[in-house]
Structures are given as structure tokens and as C-alpha cells.
Image (cartoon, rainbow, N blue to C red):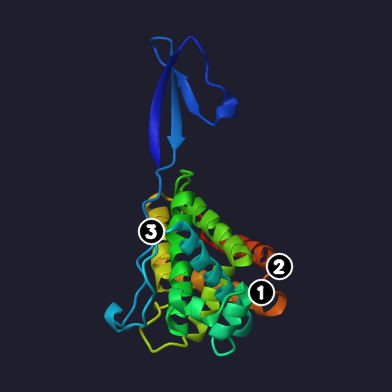
Amino acid sequence: MVVNRVVTRGSRPNDRTGCQGGENHEGENIVTQKTQKQSRATFPAPERRASGGHGPGRGPELHQERAVQTRDQILDAAAELFDRHGYAGTSVKNVADRVGMTKGAVYFHYPTKEALTIAVVDALYDRWPLLLEAVQAKGLGPMDTLSELLDQTAATFKDDVVVQGGVRLQMEQPLPEGVLPQPYVGWISLIEQLLAEAEEAGELRAGVSPSAAAHTLVSTFFGTQHIAARLDRRQDLTQRWEEARDLIFYALRA
């Protein structure tokens, strides 16, 4: 936390500003403002054990807007089907039928079903750094940044079909080991960074291990997501997460 001293003349501090202050011998008002130090935690790049050169083809690079839109439509349709039916229960023909295209048109953008699978999971991982950046831009303290990030992530799980399909594929791990990123490790690392920042800022309860707490939070968050997905198609996910969040953060906050 950063503390700034603001000197004003001819006025008194407003009690409603949350500032602390007083008057010095020169009649100046000394106002102490507390501002949060913005988190610098980062979401690690996804871990893959297999080299990129051994993975299935990912399709041609596209630059025309219409072609990019078509690829995105295919991706969304595939993600929805993967979420509902899993990898084994989804075929390229199913995807083509969903978007009203031929299989050949789908194969132009995604040469194999495996390439389509990788693209959905990659799109899932692309969401998280952008979401973290948006939350960090609010200038909250580490604990509030973490809470807000997980709240926003829960909302994304509920509403974003690419996230839903990507998570199902991550759980199934249908491709050879190492082709898809190792799940959860990025979240554990990120949350541990935020909790370490919270500890440094005096926001973490004394005696709490950032590493142990990060593992617990990831287990709780993704467990809540998984149960909500299986029982109610995530309709009550945000409510269930808020209930779990309040309990855990009560134990974590200083």
C-alpha cells in the first residue's frame, strides 16, 4: 500500500473521504491518502510437455475478416458440442451441420478434429490474461483483485461457450499427453502470486501459506464450477461461487 501526504490550505479534511489528517503549525491541512498498489501478477503461459512441432495442423493463417469470422463460428459451434457431448461424442460432421457448412469447408479452417480441439482449448487460455488485465486496471488491492478476478471468471464460465467447451476438453484430455496444456497449474501460480502480494501488503491473515491457500482456492473454485456444470448447466454457478468465496476469504483476510 502506498501512502501519499497531500497539503491543502484554508480547508479542513472531509471526514467522508476516508482520509486521515490534521493541521500543522503553519495552518496547513495535512491529509494522508492511502492508495492501493496495483497488482503485477501475471498469468503464466500454458504448459505443454509435447513440442509444438509434433501437434496436429492448426489450419492456414487468415487475414480476411470474413474468413476469421467463419473460423470463429466454427470454433463456437465446436465448443458448444464438446461441452454437451464430449470429445468422443462430437464429430466434424456434427460441427459442420451446426454451422450449416460442408465438412470440407470445416477442414479448410481446421484440418483435423484434433486441430479443432487444440483451437478451442487455446481460445480458453487466451481469455484469462485479458480478464486479469481488465481486473488489475481497476487498481484494487491484491485480495480484492483476487476476489474480483474469480467473480469475473465464474461469470465467464457461466456465459462463454468457448470456455465451457475448453474446460470439458481439459478435463477429458482426449489427445496424447502433453498436446493440451497442463490444467490448473497456471491458476495455482497466478493465485499464489496474488496471495504473496496480499501478504506483503498486510492483507493476508498471519500464518496463511500463499502456496497452500492457492491450491485450496483452485480446488474450491474449479470444484464448484464442475458441480454446477453437471447438476444445473451452471445456472447457479455464480451464486454457489459467491457462497464459497465468502467462506474462504473470511479465513484468508487479515
Label 3 close to label 2 by CB (< 8 Å) = no
**Label 3, label 2: how far apart the Cα atoms are:** 31 Å
Q: Position of residue 46 (x, y in %)?
A: 37, 71
Instruction: Locate residue 44 relative to residue 206 in the image: left or right.
Output: left
Look at discs 1 and 3 and give the one toward the viewer. Answer: 1
| Residue type at the position of mark 3 | Ala
* Circle nearer the N terminus (1, 2): 1
For image coordinates 45% across by 73% down, the residue present is 109
State the SS at label 3: helix
Residue count near mark 1 (Cα–Cα under 10 Å), binned few <14, some 14–19, many ≥20: many
Whole-percent x, y for residue 118 in the image: 43, 77
Q: Quadrant of residue 18?
A: top right
Whether residues under marks 1 and 3 lie with C-beta atoms below 8 angstroms apart, the answer is: no
Q: Which residue is mark 2?
A: 236
Q: Nearer the viewer, residue 94 or 85?
A: 94
Q: Is 243 situated above or below 39?
A: below
Residue at x 39%, y 62% (from the top left corner): 43
Q: Which image quadrant: the N terminus?
A: top left
Task: Give the residue displayed 36% in from the left and 79% down from the top.
Answer: 57
- How many angstroms separate mark 1 from mark 2 (CA)? 7 Å
Q: Is tag 3's residue or tag 2's residue first in the polypeptide sequence?
A: 3
Residue 184: image quadrant is: bottom left
Q: Label 2 amino acid?
A: Asp
Q: Which residue is mark 3?
A: 196
Q: Amino acid at mark 1?
A: Ala
Q: Which residue is mark 1?
A: 228
Tell whether 13 sits left or right of 100.
left
Nearer the N terminus, badge 1 or badge 3?
3
Mark-to-mark CA distance, 1 and 3: 30 Å
Would you say the residues marked 1 and 2 are in contact, meaning their CB atoms lie under 8 Å apart? yes
Residue 217 percent coordinates (x, y)? 51, 68
